Amino acid sequence: MDWGREAQHRLQDIATLSAPGAGVTRFPFTQEHADARDKISQWMNAAGLKTRLDAACTLIGRREGPPGSPTFLIGSHQDSVLGGGAYDGIMGVALGCLALEKLAADGITLPFAVEVLAFADEEGVRFPTALIGPRALAGTLDDRVLDMCDQDGVTLAGALNSAGGDAAAIAKIARSRSDILGYLEAHIEQGPLLESEDLPLGIVTGICGIERNTVTFTGATGHAGTVPMNLRQDALVAAAHLIAEVDRLAATDPNIRATVGRIENHPNVVNGIPREVTVTVEIRGTDDAIRQRFAGELKSFCAEISCNRRIDVSFERTYEQTAVSCDEGFRKLLAGACEAEGIAPRELPSGATHDASAMADLCPIAMLFTRCRGGISHSPEEFATDADMGQTVTVMARFLQDLAAHIADQPEPAQAAR
Amino acid sequence: MDWGREAQHRLQDIATLSAPGAGVTRFPFTQEHADARDKISQWMNAAGLKTRLDAACTLIGRREGPPGSPTFLIGSHQDSVLGGGAYDGIMGVALGCLALEKLAADGITLPFAVEVLAFADEEGVRFPTALIGPRALAGTLDDRVLDMCDQDGVTLAGALNSAGGDAAAIAKIARSRSDILGYLEAHIEQGPLLESEDLPLGIVTGICGIERNTVTFTGATGHAGTVPMNLRQDALVAAAHLIAEVDRLAATDPNIRATVGRIENHPNVVNGIPREVTVTVEIRGTDDAIRQRFAGELKSFCAEISCNRRIDVSFERTYEQTAVSCDEGFRKLLAGACEAEGIAPRELPSGATHDASAMADLCPIAMLFTRCRGGISHSPEEFATDADMGQTVTVMARFLQDLAAHIADQPEPAQAAR
């Protein structure tokens, strides 16, 4: 079996289960979602997994292990953004099923149970929340999100129940930490690093913490022809200095990614000196302390600008999410699996959030990134090759085998890889 | 007579002739314009001037000189922007009338004819053109502008004719260069320089040349969390470096005013690396060669950015207007008049265009700037004090006297002050 080719075939097939429009649009708890679950059930069955739907509408395929053995989880999400691609999320489900199908085909049994999880909603596009599937399993779901509504006024609880879930039972599906060995997720990289280094896949070190800040510079407008340069309080010039500094400072630390993505300028006319400029500064990093120190340095920089340029600056954090580390033991096993397959083990951070972020509250996590063309995601242009997906399947399967071997060498299996 | 107080009174009075809304809105060839002309005729009559309307709807008040003597012109415009102030334009007309009224009150006759010109349209808000009054006098009006329409579909020719002008006769009203001694215009500064130096008025060295450029930076977008800093082609960072450089470089030359007033960013989202940024770069300077060299330096800077940051940059000039110099001899006479009135003679460039820009094609020009509060113009907040306007009237009157004396000393009057 050419696992990569099969993955490509399955992903192109399930991509047709989409709302109308360019690319893939598959929101949670819709008809497309129900159709996709049928398709994924077939993949699970082909891998010898027994399927069921949990209260949070996560489709679960399970193969039992020896009596009393713990469970290892593999998962990702089935949903897409509006007009998204055929790989983000769903690829991890497909490759998880294929990795287990490959082990079965190779006649390998594992000393633990395995499950593939197809989560309903990671993108958070339909409801103003996300990750309810993994949060329910981790026991960290805040019940209040069930009352949130989509733009048609449908509550999350209502949508969940109508799709076969059971909002009232969600609290009961939290897994016991001692039963779960770990969680592995494969995902497209959504960035250009692997492509730039000509590598099929990479091992994720952790999922970045994120903070978003809104910085507003207030100066004074005036006629572009009549106000001498030395009497100006040009808010856009002040903002430009910050934008350049964000880029300069972030480049000094490989753990940091910082971006001014949004800018609004007033009055924004060719012959008017800018009076007020608002920018967003998003900072991501796998080390929360480094990220926070970075933000502090930018704040000091803004204070200098304010003083030197007679510009009022407000710097406000509007969002924060802490970093999550991938398990050291799992990372070593994945590196070994790569080497065994002739792939240089390349570690890289995840700048984006994933289901694994929430699963980290339940168990040790691991992630693999598969190279994607041009680093593009959330677009109909998303693409991963047969070969790269095939190698990801192989590394996942070998990781499970190596984990089994590793556990066999250890007195305490559940803690072994931590 | 307190000339400043009288100026204030007249300007507050004529400010009531406005379309509804905050501030003053007096567009050309409207009922407000007709009403304003009646008011200005009274001012002219009080100064002993005989009034008439020319084909371009310029209201002219004239006092004859000795037979065969040349004519000196004083002028400004009656119109305002939408929701403008009570001083921009109309103040020059009021102060011109008062300067002549003062000379008459002081029993001073001049050895030349004088005219006060109240031009119809300098702001160019109603029609996509402006300065038809002074261009008609200078013989530089392009006939084709008469076919331009306002937003109601009224042609400029139609509006002009309905307001008492005569579009067909415009070509005939060009003045003979040998008949005109010069042109003097008083205007609010529209900038903060005089206020910052505590001076009531200043002498304009010239009217800046202007160029406008559109600079577009094209890089590549990507996820703010997944693209490492060193692989980014962030168009906003590139633009920020230019914005900072425009400011830095302009501050090194007092003749230059350069402004990035407008910025557009795509996709302009908090977690997306900016792909394409377009900014406007407006450059003004009294020396065209210096301005063009400045633009050239910015272009070179952009070429460096393009190379260092793998960003495509296009730098296109969308507009250019050359600089106009104020007459050296007139500037000396104005400086002498200031000194005689105990005012430090401060020279400064005009960053904005004025009626004088077009009059420069007919005759030597001079301009005075009157301090305005906060440097504010084109706003209901526009304000000039009684005292500053009074001093401007006095300097204008003394300038005319000194010009008369100067001419008497010279064999060739019309060239004397050039």
Image (cartoon, coloured by chain):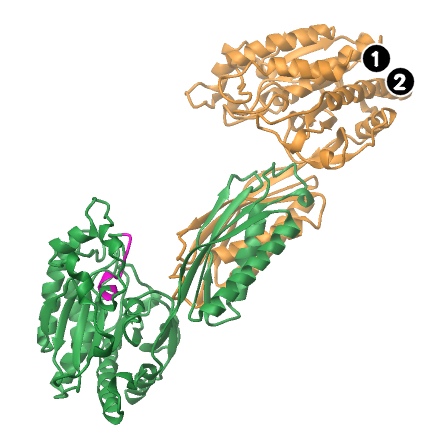
Chain colours: A orange, B green
At 53% across and 70% down in the image, what residue appears? Answer: B252
Q: Are marks 1 and 2 in contact (CB under 8 Å)?
A: yes
- Residue A307 tag number: none
Coordinates of residue A235 in the picture (x, y in percent): 47, 56
Left or right? Give the position of A229 relative to A359.
left
Coordinates of residue A34 in the picture (x, y in percent): 55, 10
Residue B87 visible within the image = no
At 53% across and 27% down in the image, what residue appears? Answer: A129
Res A282 → quadrant: top right
Work out which residue is located at the far bottom of the displayed protein and give it.
Answer: B409
Q: Rate crowding at label 2 as few (under 14), some (14 to 19) or many (20 or more) other CA atoms within 10 Å.
A: few
Res B211 → quadrant: bottom left
Q: In which quadrant of the rendered image does the C terminus of chain B lie? A: bottom left
B238 lies above or below B122: above
The front one of B415 and B307 is B415
Q: Rate crowding at label 1 as few (under 14), some (14 to 19) or many (20 or more) other CA atoms within 10 Å.
A: many
Judging by the rendered image, the residue that carries numbered circle 1 is A111
Coordinates of residue B318 in the picture (x, y in percent): 43, 54
A271 lies above or below B386: above
Coordinates of residue A259 in the picture (x, y in percent): 59, 44
Same subunit: marks 1 and 2: yes
Q: Chain of mark 2?
A: A
At 57% across and 46% down in the image, what residue appears? Answer: B235
- Residue A408 tag number: 2
Instruction: Report the magenta residues as a range.
Output: B128-135
Look at label 2 and name its amino acid. Ala
Residue B353 visible within the image = yes
Left or right? Give the position of A378 relative to A350.
left
Work out which residue is located at the far right of the displayed protein and give it.
Answer: A409
Look at label 1 and name its amino acid. Pro
SS under mark 2: helix
Mark 2 or mark 1, which is nearer the start of the sequence?
A: 1
